[in-house]
Every structure is written in structure tokens, then in C-alpha cells.
Image (cartoon, rainbow, N blue to C red):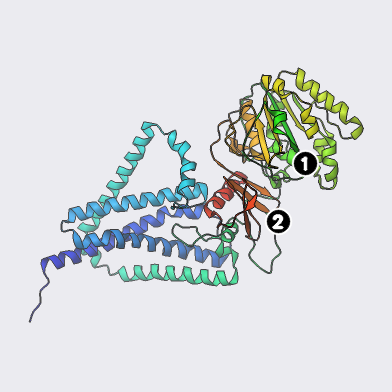
Amino acid sequence: MIYTESPRRKQITQQVAWGHWFAFANILMAIVISSVYLFSTAVADTPLSFVYMLSTWFGHISFISFLVFVVLVLPLCYQLKNMRVLRGTASVISAIALALLAFDALVYNNTGFHISFSSAELLRSETQVQVGAFSWLQWFYLCLLFIIWLMFQLVVANAIYQRMDRLQKLHISRYITTFFVLCFMASHAIHVWADAKLYTPVLKQDNMFPLSYPATAKTLMARYGLLDLEVRQQREELQIQGVSNRFVYPPKNVFCSVDAQQKVVLLASNQAINPADVSALTPNKFHLNTQSDPSRFFTQLQYGIPYNLVTRTSAPPVIIDLLNAFNVNSTRFVESSLVSAYEGAISEDASADLAEDDDANTQTSTQLSDKQQAWNSFQQSLNTTDSGLFYALVSAEQINQLNFTSISNGASVLLVAKDAQDGMYKLFSNFTDSTQASTNEDIAPTIARQFGCLADVYRFSTGQALQNPTRDWLVSTMGDNIVYFKSPFLTQVAIDGSYEVIDVNDQSEVLIDIDTNMLSRSIKHLENFSQ
């Protein structure tokens, strides 16, 4: 008996064959697009890690691309009878899928995390300002770009369909399939070995591609060069990848004008104050201070960068240098009794802060016998001068001696101090957004913005201007640890990958999983600045 293939069965066979070649074309396009991930990650520094990177790139991207084909396109090859409809539908699906891949690559390049349900809220907060600023013309260009991309998919789909007979004669499908399968298996085999041996050059590539291995605090720290997983090596000092021992500050040149008529007052204290004593100022709910040493605390406020970066530069703070360039008066005072208990820990740059004047109007007391005279001089200058920057490290007693109602009438005031009622640091101010949590790094850009400097903050600081904050999370370093805050949780990640999560509302430790997306975003923020 002779069996003949029915026309419908023959059509399905042709459509499935076309679908496989169309999937292969999209795999190649996906591999090209995903090369962005390679440029967004540290270069593999060993032969094995380089082999792993390539095998993961080809194996994983081909796997997820083929998975999309199997789930979304292959069923259509069996259901749809009209080939034109099949080609059009498959092209739309592929165009959307590759557009999502390109968007994910863009997000990863800028934030360090991938699009997922867990990162949706963080992604929304990251993009709402930029998207809100889009004009109708920019939206039009985006739509036009997608239409062009869709037309390209249709051209590819039709070109493959018209050349099916020629493609079938190539007999290379088995070699292509074998190559991608071997890459996929090799990447997993290498990763299993690296995980068992704690081989850092491979482990730090975890979560490089979307839908890959789940990220943990340890793998994220390893990826950015902040964690040494080799048991035979000594623990290294925390450093941001790409930063040399001599940090270039500021990383980018700062160009802006300054309003010399402004008067800004910055006061800092590591002592507890009663909010009623500064009722003219509005406190925020939380200020992240990562320095217990008063001198380092005060220095970090001026620089607007993590203190471990401050120690790598001898350049003056940008805000002070900028004001001096425009001949704007800057007056400083440091209460010597606050730093006497930390004399052994004061760094050279902090000692210089205590010993040198910014200009002829700066009077700093380094001896207890001269303390009252210097303080009286600072108060007199503060009360009689109509413009300039006044910044001081003061005690709670000295804060009580100031009339903030009078000072606030003619100046923009920032006061960073402990709240005696709950023991937390807070920012008291008369011009910043009080709903926004703040950190030491935010003070310098806030002062610069108040003086009318419109230069991009990222050029000289890891913080943000608190007049119009653009993000609701904070990140800094505390010794060897990464510290980040996303209300209401303060997370501290140690150099060995261990972490602690604190609810700042009641200062209690919370036993929850670490937010790896937020950790990745925080480290990426520091890395982008330092590079």
C-alpha cells in the first residue's frame, strides 16, 4: 500500500521548516543585540572565564531565543493555514521580543539589573522622570523606530520563505544545533565547577544575561570586584572596580556659574539635639550618616562622595573650589572638642581642615583656649554677612545658641544632626524636600544647586540635589561595607557577602531576603561615578 502525504501535512512541514530558519535568523540578531551585556560587564581576565563568557553568550541567548520560538511561534505553524498571516504574526512576536531584549540590555547597562517582576517598582522609579520629560516628537520617533524594526522582521521572514529550497540544501542545521547545544552545556559545566571551587572570575559573571542564574549578595559583590571568594587569598580592601589607588576627583569637569548673592548655611553635629530648638527648620524622616568620626563626617559632607573615595584624592571639595573661583565668601568653623576623642583616627585631609583657612574670613579653632573666640567670630560673621557659604561642625550646645528663625529669614539652611527623640540622624532644612530621605553625599550637590550651579550632579558627587530629588533610594559605603537605603529598610552588605537589614522605623533587624536588584543598582551607581 502506498501512503501519500496530505497537502495539509506537507504545508505544516514547510511552515515548521520555515519557522526553524526564521528562529535561527532571530537568534543571530539576539546575539548581536546581547553583545551590549558584554560591554556593560568587566572583561573576563582569565582564559577559562573568557571561554565561559563566550559559551554563555552563545548558549544562553540561543536557548532563550529558541524557547520564545517554541512557546509562541511554533504552535502557530501548526494552527495557521495562511502563510502570509503566519509570517506577519511571527514577525510581530519577534520584533516585540527583540525590542524587549534591547530595552533590557539598556536597563542593565545603566542600572546593573534586568527587567523582572521584582524589579518593576525600582525600574518605574528610575524611568518615570526621564519618560515624563519625553515630548510627543520623541514618542513619535520611538514608534517610528519600532515600525522600521518590524518591517525589517517582515523582510527577513519573506526572504527566508522565498529561499526555502536553497536553504534546505545547505544541510547545516545539525551543525548549528550542535554548536549551540555544546555552548549551553559547556557554560553550565564550567559554572558548576567554578561554584564548587569558588572561582571568582567565572562567578562574577552570574546574572550577566536575562533569565540566567539567580543573583545573590555574594555573586553581585563578586561581579563588581567587591568580593574575594578565593579562600587562599587575603581579604582585600573594599574598592570600586575601575578605581585606581589615586582617585581622580572630580571624575568629570564641572562647568557652571554661581549666584554670588546667595547665602547658604551648613551645620553638622554628631550630637543629639531637640527638634524644638530648631523649630524654624523642617526635618526629614531619615538621614544616612556612615561616619562615626566627626571629622570624617564633616569632610564627607563637603565632598559629596563616599569617604573611601575622599581618602584617595588631595583635591579640594568641588563646591569650595567653585565658590573660590567666583570670589564667593566661604567661612568655616570646627568645634575642636568634638574631634579630640578621635585624634588618632583623623586623616591628613581632616587635620588640614582643622589647621587651614579657606580664605581670610575663615576662622577655625584648634585649641580649647581659642574655642569661644573662634565661635563668637563665626556667629558674628553669620549674622552680619548677607551672602556666601557658612559651614561648621558644631556641638548641640552651640546649636542652641543660634537663632534659626532669624538666620532662616535671609539664608538657606542645612542642619545635619541626631534627633534626640528617636536617636536617628536627620536633615533639618528650610528649602529642601522634607519627604526625601538624605545622605551625606546629597549635601554638596544641594549646596551647589542652591548657589545656582546647574552642572550635572554625577560629575562631582554620588548624591543628588534635594531641591528636586530624582531617586528615592540612597547608597554609600561604611568601611568595607556597601550600605543602601530604600524606605523603610537600611541594608548593609559586608565584604564577605553577608548582610543585615534594619527597619529604620524601630531600628530592629528584619529577617528578609536581600533585594538583589537594589544592591545591583546601588553598586552600579557607585561604579559609574568612579569610572
170 sits left or right of 341 in the view: left
Pick the residue in front: 56 or 229: 229
Mark 1: secondary structure: helix
Mark 2: secondary structure: loop
Q: Is the residue 377 above or below the residue 64 in the image?
A: above
Q: Residue at x 67, y 38 (%)?
A: 426
274 sits left or right of 26 in the view: right
Locate the N terminus by quadrant. bottom left
- Tell me which numbered mark, 1 or 2, is placed earlier along the sequence: 2
Q: CA distance from mark 1 to mark 2?
A: 22 Å
Name the quadrant containing residue 378.
top right
Q: Is residue 394 in sight in this rendering?
A: no
523 sits left or right of 1 in the view: right
Q: Which residue is mark 2?
A: 237
Q: Label 1: how many residues lie within 10 Å, few (<14), some (14-19) or many (20+)?
A: many
Name the quadrant containing residue 333.
top right
Name the quadrant containing residue 7.
bottom left
Q: Which residue is mark 1?
A: 294
**Can you give x and y, in whole percent of width and height, for residue 273 in the image?**
74, 35
Is label 1 in contact with label 2 (beta carbons under 8 Å)? no
Q: Label 2: how many residues lie within 10 Å, few (<14), some (14-19) or many (20+)?
A: some
Pick the residue in front: 508 or 201: 508
Q: Residue at x 52, y 68 (%)?
A: 191
Q: Is the residue 333 above or below the residue 189 in the image?
A: above
Q: Residue at x 80, y 27 (%)?
A: 362
Q: Is the residue 29 above or below the residue 328 in the image?
A: below
Q: Is residue 337 in sight in this rendering?
A: yes
**Can you give x and y, in whole percent of width and height, for residue 155 in the image?**
26, 50
